[in-house]
Amino acid sequence: MTKRDAIFPAGRQALYEINRYSAAIRSGDLLFVSGQVGSREDGSPEPVFEKQVRLAFDNLAAVLKAAGCTFDDVVDVTTFHTDPVTQFAAVNAVRSAVIGEPPYPNWTAVGVNWLAGFDFEIKVIARIPVSA
């Protein structure tokens, strides 16, 4: 069996070790990124929702960069929201600023009732560029 090729951005190692997961796994030319949340340096949730969403996207960008990817390489997105009706406009504002031009990636938004103290989480699948 082939060993997993784990990808980690600089920093936040304690979060991954404590919870026993990888930030992302490379499989062939695909990158499967674990859910990213708006955690501050100490691992706690950013209390302001809009800032929490922005930080989640920033954390995702760091994982993508560690694998040689950008948001342009993302093909599939899943987001999790604790209150989708009231949160979706704020999420869309950040998403529109980060996700580039068409064609846009697939996107699935899921309402949930628990995200370990967070209100938003994003996970993606990206195609790793040939040069990475």
Image (cartoon, helix red, strand yellow):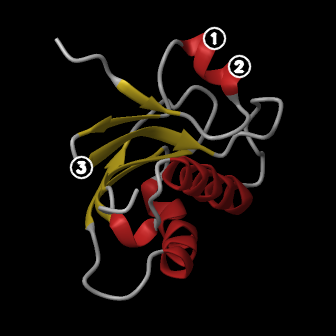
**Which element carries disc 3, helix, strand or loop?**
loop
What amino acid type is highlighted by mark number 3?
Asp
**Which element carries disc 1, helix, strand or loop?**
helix
What amino acid type is highlighted by mark number 1?
Ile
| 128 and 104: which is toward the camera | 128
Instruction: From the top left corner, tell me how far across and down residue 38 is, in percent.
Output: 66, 46
| 8 and 132: which is toward the camera | 132
- The relative height of residue 31 versus residue 72 in the rendered view (above or below) is above
Instruction: From the top left corner, tell me how far across and down residue 14 is, in percent.
Output: 71, 19
Q: Which residue is mark 3?
A: 29
Distance in Å between CA atoms under marks 3 and 2: 27 Å
Are discs 1 and 2 less than 8 Å apart at CB? yes
What amino acid type is highlighted by mark number 2?
Ala
Nearest to viewer (mark 3 / mark 1): 3
Residue 98 is left or right of residue 132, and the answer is right
Quarter of the rendering containing residue 25: top left
Q: Residues within 10 Å of mark 1 (few under 14, many from 20)?
A: few
Instruction: From the top left corner, tell me how far across and down residue 93 is, in percent.
Output: 55, 77
